[in-house]
Image: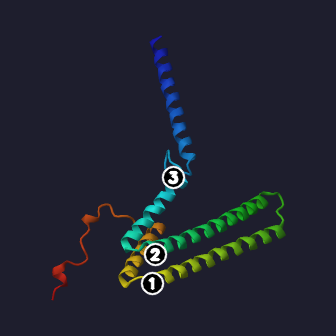
Amino acid sequence: MMKRNRTTLISAIALISLVCLGLTFAQMDDNDGDRPGENGKAWRQMKWERIFNRLVDGLGLTEEQADELKAIFEEHHESMRELKDALRDVLRLIREELAKDEPDEEELARLSAQANAIREQMEEERDAFKTRIDEFKSGLTITQQAKFLLFEARMHGRRFGHHPRRENPRDEKPLATPRALLP
């Protein structure tokens, strides 16, 4: 009898644990996979705004400059979002066509050409964005331009994983000490 109660208790605990684990994973799936319990899109927006504000503060931009820069970023983001959505739709159609027993070669060729055209548009949008950013930077002081350049390098590194965050930046030795700079 005692062994039966222990087995029942262990089974009940295991069942409750599985249910709790399932609820945890379900909660994570509801938010675009960013952070448990938070809306993924809202989290990305907050992160972007924090980065943008840090850039504005670091460069010491005026309110007009900040508004101009924000408009450039938002216009680029919206254009790229539309192009990415269009590309995603075309790629879905390609997958559907390939899933058929006998895919239509002409349809695949048409869809592939459409996907390549969208990718070219995305590249053109990136180039236009870089041009608008360069025009914006040309109106900044030399110090602001240098700070912007460092910001771009840091963001590029984080995005592509070239420069992982340091565990403790205080542990790193400076490249040069003031005495080393003296003759």
Where disc 1 sits, the SS reads loop
The type of residue carrying mark 1 is: Gly
Q: Are marks 2 and 1 in contact (CB under 8 Å)?
A: yes
Q: Which residue is mark 1?
A: 139
Extreme-front residue of the structure: 64
Label 3 crowd (10 A; few <14 / some 14-19 / many >=20): some
Disc assigned to residue 183: none
Where disc 2 sits, the SS reads helix
Q: Nearer the viewer, residue 103 or 107?
A: 107
Q: Residue at x 84, y 65 (%)?
A: 104
Question: Residue 91 location in percent, x, y?
Answer: 71, 64
Question: Residue 166 location in percent, x, y?
Answer: 34, 64
Q: Is residue 182 left or right of residue 62?
A: left
Q: Residue at x 50, y 19 (%)?
A: 8
> Disc 2 or 1, which lies upstream in sequence?
2
Label 2 crowd (10 A; few <14 / some 14-19 / many >=20): some
Disc assigned to residue 65: 2
Q: Quadrant of residue 146?
A: bottom left
Q: Is residue 51 left or right of residue 15?
A: left
Q: Residue at x 51, y 59 (%)?
A: 45
Q: How is the image coloured?
A: rainbow
Extreme-top residue of the structure: 1
Disc assigned to residue 34: 3
Q: Is residue 96 left or right of residue 144?
A: right
Q: Are marks 2 and 3 in contact (CB under 8 Å)?
A: no
Q: Quadrant of residue 60?
A: bottom left
